[in-house]
Amino acid sequence: MSFFPVCRPRRLRKTQAVRNQVAETVLRTEDLMYPVFVVHGENIKKEINGMPGQYHYSLDRLPELINEIEKAGILSIMLFGIPAKKDRYASENYTDNGIVQKAIRLIKTLSPALVIATDVCLCAYTEDGHCGITHNGQIDNDQTLDILQKTAVSHAQSGADIVAPSGMMDGMIQAMRQGLDQNDFSDVMIMSYAVKYASAFYGPFRGACGSEPTGDRKSYQMDYRNKKEARKEARMDQEEGADFLMVKPALSYLDIIQDVVEHSTLPVAAYHVSGEYAMIKAAAGNGWVDEKAIVIESLTSIKRAGAKIILTYYALDVAQWLAET
Ligand SMILES: [Zn+2]
């Protein structure tokens, strides 16, 4: 190790060209996965409260979005459905005529190469907004696994490439993998929301999916005071057959992303969640921060921590910004 004055680190920061050539982490459009919300009805493109610039789409308006995604060079989406009605057993989650199933079939005709991941969680479909079936105020973990398994198979039958459980039920990956394999879907991937914290950063999303729970989700989502537990969750899901692991949220959990990446052999995704999006939008709307600069810096830091895939509501904007530079 040389020291000043022989060593002058500023030499490598002298011009943009040199900085670009020595940059260790470069954000690409291919790194991004875009969350898409679909609803029943006609001619709906309705802005989501708390998430300016993000919309609910009815199926007849979906082609315009898919076209935009394809043109932007975004390779994958995460699909969320808002059901016609909620019930105790989240029935619409696994019926062939569910909103997600219909959307998958439509998107596959519009853009066959677009990678479709689907969120299979129950919380948008249950009356109490919980990610599992409840009995006397308690989540029934193992009964929920049956529903996750049925939903995974149903989404696969409709053409999903990746199924993604976000409910933090124990054994969810094993149950889904078995269901998929027994139904000839051994090539359908599982992206596990393996390390999902009980977080205040999800606020706007719950409005988007109408999934504000009765009580809270602290009996199944992780405690943000814990780090070792993330390693345990990630290892279990890898051993149960997950193809990708996810950490959620992202910016307040960069240490967790790095730790999971270092202790797993699977690609790790990170979800830059609705509250993270909303905070930047609000500050930018007031002229307090440079939106483009702060978004690129934020997402690059998530990649620098080790995430291979970044789920973000900013995907379309970022694709455009990166194309301009
Ligand atoms: Zn959920």
Image (cartoon, rainbow, N blue to C red):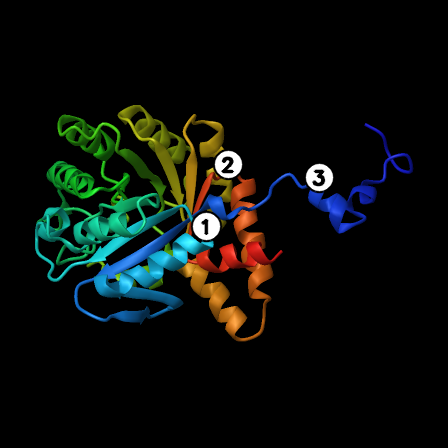
Marked residue nearer the N-terminal end (1 or 3): 3
Marks 1 and 2, how far apart in space? 27 Å
In the rendering, at what x and y percent does residue 270 appear?
43, 44
Q: Provide residue 276's location: percent of width, then percent of height.
A: 45, 58
Question: Residue under circle 3?
Answer: 22
Q: Is mark 2 on a helix, strand or loop?
A: helix
Q: Which residue is drawn at 10% across and 52% down?
A: 97
Contact check, label 2 and label 3, Cβ < 8 Å:
no
Taking the view exactly as shown, the residue that stands out farthest to the right is 5
| Earlier sequence position, callout 2 versus callout 3 | 3
Q: What residue type is labelled 1?
A: Gly
Q: Which of marks 1 and 3 is in front?
A: 1
Foreground tag (2 vs 3): 3
Question: In the drawing, what numbered circle is on residue 73?
Answer: 1
Neighbourhood count class around disc 1 (C-alpha, 10 Å): few under 14, some 14–19, many 20 upward = some
Q: Which mark is residue 258?
A: 2
**Nearer to us in this view, 22 or 126:** 22
State if disc 3 and disc 1 touch (CB < 8 Å): no
Quarter assignment of residue 61: bottom left
Q: Earlier in the sequence, mark 1 or mark 2?
A: 1
- Mark 3 belongs to which amino acid? Val
Q: Which residue lies furthest to the bottom in this view?
A: 286
Query: In this rendering, is residue 191 above or below 202?
Result: above
Q: Residue 229, percent across and down?
A: 37, 34
Q: Nearer the viewer, mark 1 or mark 2?
A: 1
Residue 8: name its quadrant.
Answer: top right
Q: Say if mark 1 contacts mark 2, CB within 8 Å.
A: no
Q: Which residue is drawn at 73% across and 45% down?
A: 19
